[in-house]
Image (cartoon, grey):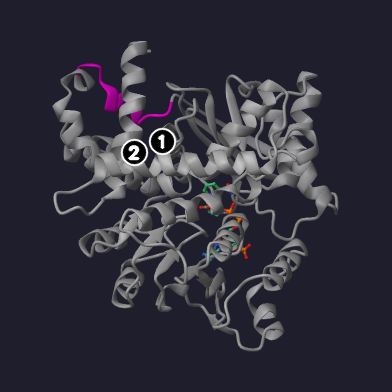
Amino acid sequence: MNVDKLMIDLEKKHPGEVEYLQAVKEVLESIEEVYNQNPQFEAAGIIERLVEPDKIITFKVPWVDDQGKAHVNLGYRVQFNNAIGPYKGGIRFHPSVNLSSLKFLGFEQIFKNSLTTLPMGGAKGGSDFNPKGKSQQEIMRFCHSFMLQLWKNLGPDTDVPAGDIGVGGREVGYMFGMHKKLTGEHTGVFTGKGRNWGGSLIRPEATGFGAVYFAQEMLKAQGETLEGKIATVSGFGNVSWGAIRKLNQLGAKVMTISGPDGYIYDPDGISGEKIDYLLELRASNQDIAKPYSYEFSNAQFHEGKRPWEVKCDLAFPCAIQNELDENDAKNLVKNGCKVVSEGANMPCVPEAIDIFLENKVLYGPGKAANAGGVATSGLEQTQNAMKLSWPAEEVEEKLRQIMINIHDACAKYGKESDGYINYMKGANIAGFIKVANAMLDQGVI
Ligand code: NDP
């Protein structure tokens, strides 16, 4: 494999798809050595077939607002690879959604799902619809219209979507409802469902919990624990909420949360009733940062800034892609940060990752560190297929064990001669080998 040549060819075919090309390059650079040691991969054109999605579905989503005015958004589903199981990956509603961002997320999802050890292929979908400021009825009409276009491409053994940014339990409910009406079947076609109609306990908090378990394992491999460590967290969405709760439970102190407008630094730590207060603000669709700083007087709001300037042992970027740049990485290193565990997908830019690796920071890439969410979705699919519901403790223990296994798989392929573990390399190789071997077994299709 010649990475430079492959990337030039890919850039010609898909000009301007920045996020997608960035994600492919990162994976190819990590697996180059292993790939070239296995000539059967080259002969079967594994890379050329793996970097292109199996199928891309694009469609328009017309909907009517509360004033009776019609709108049209774009909808997508990128079914990337189903070598090891049915397509699986979330649906994102956000104005930034475009084909490039969904192809990047779908590509990453292949390796993430492979790492979980569960039988799930990679996919991603979404729309440039902005749910912010929309009424409940508008959201429902939009979700129904989205599903009217997509339903024929989904099924519990074909493609099983889930939530992502802008898509939580409410939106999954509306989309599932329309799918059920059109098919006449109540199947496990979505994960992240309501708890009383097929959803798994622990799914909402699983991604954040998993990112913390992954950090715990990275520390354990160096003979350390989370107890007493200072953590910075970005965002305050589904993932951040889970991460903050688990960090508190395991004895760390969380100093920050953030939003697109800035971050909150709370020297007393963010825990207990403060988390409940943040959830109330979020549920009522309000900005969180400013009200939080008024309610808890020691807290400071840093407008237009990101939390990576705060001194910490552990950093958890949990908001959005490319939210931690080169300067942020330099600040973290300067301030003695030992661990970066990505709750979000690709939150660190490539230059920031280079800085972490050069400085031997324990860096857990999203495809490993945030795989707890999709792993628990996989557990939800199993429960649906068995028509059973496992207790929360059982699901969480399975999640914890999966995160330990993912850590160990990354360590196996990422350990360097001086003992440092390059988790990014390890995750890419471990995720890739399983999928590549499945593709070899199944022939050129
Ligand atoms: P949510 O929509 O629940 O939360 C996102 C949070 O990030 C919100 O608090 C949002 O603030 C904040 N935010 C958005 N843009 C910025 C910005 N530019 N700077 C700082 N904060 C910002 O999404 P999730 O928590 O579900 O997902 C977060 C990330 O984790 C995404 O990258 C997603 O792909 C990834 N992920 C999610 C999984 C899941 O199970 N949910 C699974 C695996 C990965 P506001 O609400 O004010 O816009």
Task: Select label 1 or label 2 by which is in front.
Answer: 2
Magenta stretch contains residue 237: no
Residue reaching furthest bottom? 297
- Seen at 47% across and 67% down, the residue is 227
Disc 2 designates what residue?
409
| x then y, percent, for residue 332 | 35, 72
Whether residue 416 can be seen here: yes
Residue 231 shown left or right of residue 4 in the figure:
right
Badge 1 density bin: few <14, some 14–19, many ≥20, Cα 10 Å: many
Discs 1, 2 touching: Cβ within 8 Å: yes
Q: Amino acid at mark 1?
A: Leu
Sequence-first tag of 1 and 2? 1
- Seen at 40% across and 78% down, the residue is 311
Q: Amino acid at mark 2?
A: Ala
| x then y, percent, for residue 402 | 48, 39
For the residues marked 1 and 2, what is the alpha-carbon distance in whole angstroms? 8 Å
Relative to 402, say whether 153 is above or below: above
| Element at label 2 | helix
> Where in the image, quadrant-wise, is ligand 1 located?
bottom right
**Which mark, residue 115?**
1
Q: Quadrant of the C terminus?
A: top left
Quarter of the image holding residue 409? top left
Q: Nearer the viewer, residue 223 or 185?
A: 223
- In the image, the segment drawn in magenta is 43-53
